[in-house]
Image (cartoon, rainbow, N blue to C red):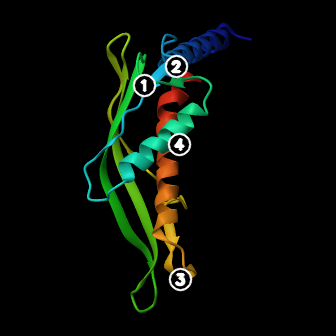
C-alpha cells in the first residue's frame, strides 16, 4: 500500500469520525430533561375540539414512552403548540366530479423548551399530520367511511410525529 492510499484512508476515517460526533451531539437531548408538561394546544381554526383531541393523543403517546414522564408541575421541559390549519381536500372524484375520497390534513407549530437551561430545543417548528402517500386522514365516501375516523387517523399520526420529533431525540 502506498503512502497516498494510507493518507487517503486516514483522512476518510477522520472525516467519518468527525461527522459522526457532530451527528451524535445534535441528536440527543440533555440528560437533565426527564419530565415534560403539555398544556392543551391552541386552536386557530374553526374546527372545534381538535386541540383537546390532539393534546390527549400526544400525552398518551408520551406516557407510553419510558424515557420521559408527563407532569402537571415541576417540569424539566415544556411542549406547547397551536393548530394553525385544518384542511379537508378532495383527492379523488367520481366521473361526475363528485368527491369520493377526502384527505384531512392538520398543520401545527410546536415549541419544545428546556426549562432547566432556559433554551429552546424546537422553536416554532411547523409539522403536518401526514404526507401525500399516507393513508392517515383519508376517508372514502364510496365505501361509507366517516370523517370522524379520518380525523382520528390524522390526529394519531400527527401526535406520533410530534412525539418522535421531541422524545425521539433521546435515542
Using the image, tell me which numbered label, if any, was put on residue 89.
none
Q: Which of the 4 image quadrants contains residue 88?
A: bottom left
> Disc 3 to disc 4, how far (Cα)?
28 Å
Q: Position of residue 118 (x, y in %)?
A: 32, 13
Which mark is first along the chain, 2 or 3?
2
61, above or below 29, in the image: below
Q: Identify the element where label 1 is drawn.
A: loop
Q: Position of residue 138 (x, y in %)?
A: 50, 66
Q: Is residue 13 left or right of residue 106?
A: right
Badge 1 is on which residue? 72
Badge 3 is on which residue? 142
- Circle 2 crowding by C-alpha within 10 Å: few under 14, some 14–19, many from 20: some
Badge 4 is on which residue? 160
Badge 2 is on which residue? 28
Q: Residue furthest bottom?
A: 96
Dots 1, 4 in contact, CB < 8 A: no
Amino acid at each position: 500500500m502506498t503512502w497516498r492510499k494510507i493518507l487517503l484512508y486516514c483522512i476518510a476515517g477522520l472525516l467519518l469520525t468527525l461527522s459522526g460526533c457532530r451527528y451524535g451531539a445534535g441528536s440527543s437531548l440533555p440528560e437533565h430533561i426527564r419530565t415534560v408538561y403539555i398544556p392543551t394546544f391552541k386552536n386557530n381554526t374553526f374546527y372545534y375540539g381538535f386541540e383537546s383531541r390532539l393534546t390527549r393523543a400526544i400525552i398518551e403517546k408520551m406516557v407510553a414512552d419510558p424515557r420521559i414522564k408527563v407532569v402537571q408541575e415541576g417540569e424539566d421541559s415544556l411542549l406547547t403548540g397551536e393548530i394553525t390549519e385544518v384542511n379537508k381536500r378532495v383527492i379523488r372524484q367520481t366521473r361526475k366530479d363528485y368527491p369520493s375520497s377526502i384527505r384531512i390534513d392538520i398543520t401545527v407549530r410546536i415549541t419544545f423548551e428546556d426549562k432547566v437551561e432556559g433554551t429552546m430545543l424546537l422553536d416554532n417548528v411547523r409539522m403536518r399530520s401526514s404526507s401525500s402517500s399516507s393513508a392517515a386522514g383519508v376517508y372514502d365516501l364510496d365505501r361509507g367511511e366517516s370523517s370522524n375516523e379520518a380525523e382520528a387517523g390524522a390526529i394519531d399520526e400527527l401526535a406520533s410525529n410530534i412525539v418522535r420529533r421531541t422524545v425521539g431525540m433521546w435515542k
